[in-house]
Structure formats: C-alpha cells, structure tokens
C-alpha cells in the first residue's frame, strides 16, 4: 500500500534545502513540504526555549498539512528541540546530528574529528554526545562560525570576504591532526568549495545524504513509503519574503522554484 502523505522538512532558512535535495534524489516519488523560517533566521544565536517554541510551531503547521514524517533539517533545532518534539508529537521526527555524527565516525581514520557550527549547536555539545556514543576514543575539536549562515542567506559564497571569515574561524583549530570535519549546519555545504580551499585534504561531512538514507529506512520500517512511480510534488513555505527565498534557493537546489507560499507561523 502506498502512503502519499508528504514528508515535512524545516529549517531556520534556506539551509535545509540541501536535505530536501538529497531526499528528492533518493526518494523521487515522495511528496515534500518545506518550511524555511526566514523571518526568524538565524537560530544559532537564540535561546533554547525560543528555538523549541519556533520548532513546535512549525511542527504543528506541518501536521496540519498531514505530514507523515518530519525532518528537523537544522542543526541548532536538532540539538536543542528534537527531544521535545519527539516527546510531544506522535509521528516520526528525525534530526540531522545523529546521521552526520555516525558518518564522521565511520570515515575518520585517526579519530580526530572537527565540528564547525552555530553558537547554539557548538554550545550544546550535541555532536560530541553522539560521537562519544559511537566511539568513546574520538577526539573532537569544535569551532563556532556564526557569520557563515548570514553569508549563505545573502548569497555571498566566495571572494575575499568569505575567505577572510573562514580563515578567522578555522585558524583556531589544529588542522594538522584533524582528518574529518563535520559541517554542523545545513547552510554550510554551500560554502564547501571555499572551506575546502582552506582545509585542503580533510574529509568534509555533509549530513544531507545520511539523513535521506535514514528517512528511507524509517519510511520502510513504518510501511509509509510512497510507492507510486509518479514524480513527487514539492511545496515551499517561508515566514518572510517569498521572492528573496526563490532567488537564493536555486543555489541549493540547482533549479528555480515557483509559487513559494507564506506560512502563517508566528
């Protein structure tokens, strides 16, 4: 039996589109509803109670749209709100931290893993907790990079300003021993080419593909896969200007989107 209900995905802004794109590649028949909380981006400098409030409001909106599973495609919200959402709502809800940590633990050869993320994500030690569950011998080197999200949201992905900001943050890490670096924010993959120039041969972990595989596993185990052969439909919602979202979203998805709607969330 086929379950045509949509998968709900949300992020503080555009970053979660990297996860939406990965899901589309692995699960092309699934319908997707994406919510970007563009009116309240970034989440990374906000308090835990406020992030939980925002995440709960968006989850309720996605439930109204009959979502069968929700992906919290935001590292900050995954770190601070995921447990609350899973306890308060009766449907599968997954974050992006556990899949990313698992992939990093699998790929590191010397057990020295770097994590870059927002202030809230790094302060939560969420990646450390997940990595230590998998391998207590892993050494973790963390760095807050609060200016990365505003750069991506403004579409500034390369050039001297980007290079200077990357160097400003990453010079604090001991890159001589780290062999694997987790991009601990779904916005950061768009800065991957610029980050890679600074990090040279380090393995960069983008959790989007790992999340997509985890979603498929959950759908299959719960017998809620959409088995139709038709291409799935996508609907996009934002909490601020739809035009700004449409213009920048192409960088994440590789194609233009139309009919971005405003979600009545506040």
Image (spheres, grey):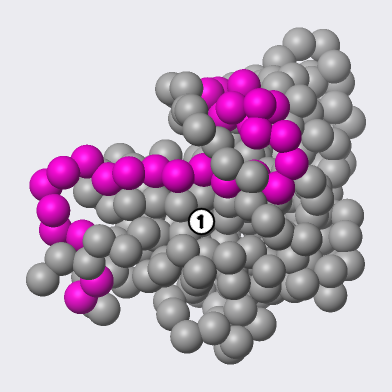
Q: How many marks?
A: 1
Q: Residues within 10 Å of mark 1 (few under 14, many from 20)?
A: many
Q: Is residue 4 toward the left or the right of residue 42 in the image? A: left
Residue 16, percent across and down? 57, 46
Residue 140, percent across and down? 69, 60
Judge whether 59 appears above or below 142 on screen.
below
Q: Is residue 50 toward the left or the right of residue 205 in the image? A: right
Q: Is residue 166 toward the left or the right of residue 37 in the image? A: right
- Judge by depth and name the residue closer to the eye, 220 or 122: 220
Q: Residue at x 72, y 34 (%)?
A: 241
Residue 133: quarter of image:
bottom right
Judge whether 30 appears above or below 176 on screen.
below
Q: Residue at x 44, y 80 (%)?
A: 91
Judge whether 245 appears above or below 81 on screen.
above
**Mark 1 falls on what kind of element?**
strand
Asked if the magenta segment contains residue 235, the reply would be yes
Asked if the magenta segment contains residue 128, the reply would be no
Q: Is residue 30 toward the left or the right of residue 145 in the image? A: left
Residue 198: quarter of image:
top right
Residue 5, percent across and down? 32, 64
Label 1, on which residue?
A: 9
Magenta span covers which residues? 223-251
Which quadrant does the C terminus fall into? bottom right
Residue 98, percent across and down? 53, 67
Q: Residue at x 52, y 64 (%)?
A: 62
Q: Residue at x 10, y 71 (%)?
A: 1
Judge whether 201 appears above or below 142 on screen.
above
Can residue 194 be seen?
A: yes
């Amino acid at each position: 039996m086929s379950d045509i209900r949509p998968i709900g995905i949300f992020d503080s802004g555009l970053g979660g589109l990297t996860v939406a794109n990965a899901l589309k590649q692995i699960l092309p028949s699934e319908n997707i509803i994406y919510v970007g909380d563009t009116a309240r981006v970034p989440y990374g400098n906000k308090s835990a109670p406020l992030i939980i409030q925002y995440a709960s409001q968006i989850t309720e909106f996605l439930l109204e749209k009959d979502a069968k599973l929700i992906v919290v495609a935001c590292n900050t919200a995954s770190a601070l709100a995921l447990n609350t959402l899973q306890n308060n709502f009766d449907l599968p809800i997954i974050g992006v931290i556990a899949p990313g940590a698992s992939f990093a633990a699998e790929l590191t050869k010397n057990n020295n893993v770097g994590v870059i993320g927002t202030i809230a994500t790094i302060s939560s030690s969420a990646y450390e907790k997940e990595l230590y569950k998998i391998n207590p011998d892993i050494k973790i080197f963390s760095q807050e990079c609060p200016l990365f999200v505003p750069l991506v949201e403004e579409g500034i992905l390369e050039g001297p300003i980007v290079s200077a900001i990357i160097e400003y943050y990453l010079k604090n890490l001991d890159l001589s021993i780290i062999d694997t670096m987790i991009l601990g924010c779904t916005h950061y993959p768009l800065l991957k080419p610029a980050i890679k120039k600074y990090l040279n041969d380090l393995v960069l972990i983008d959790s989007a593909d790992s999340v997509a595989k985890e979603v498929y596993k959950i759908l299959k185990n719960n017998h809620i896969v959409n088995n139709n052969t038709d291409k799935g439909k996508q609907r996009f919602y934002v909490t601020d200007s739809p035009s700004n979202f449409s213009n920048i979203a192409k960088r994440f998805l590789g194609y233009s989107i139309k009919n971005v709607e405003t979600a009545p969330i506040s």
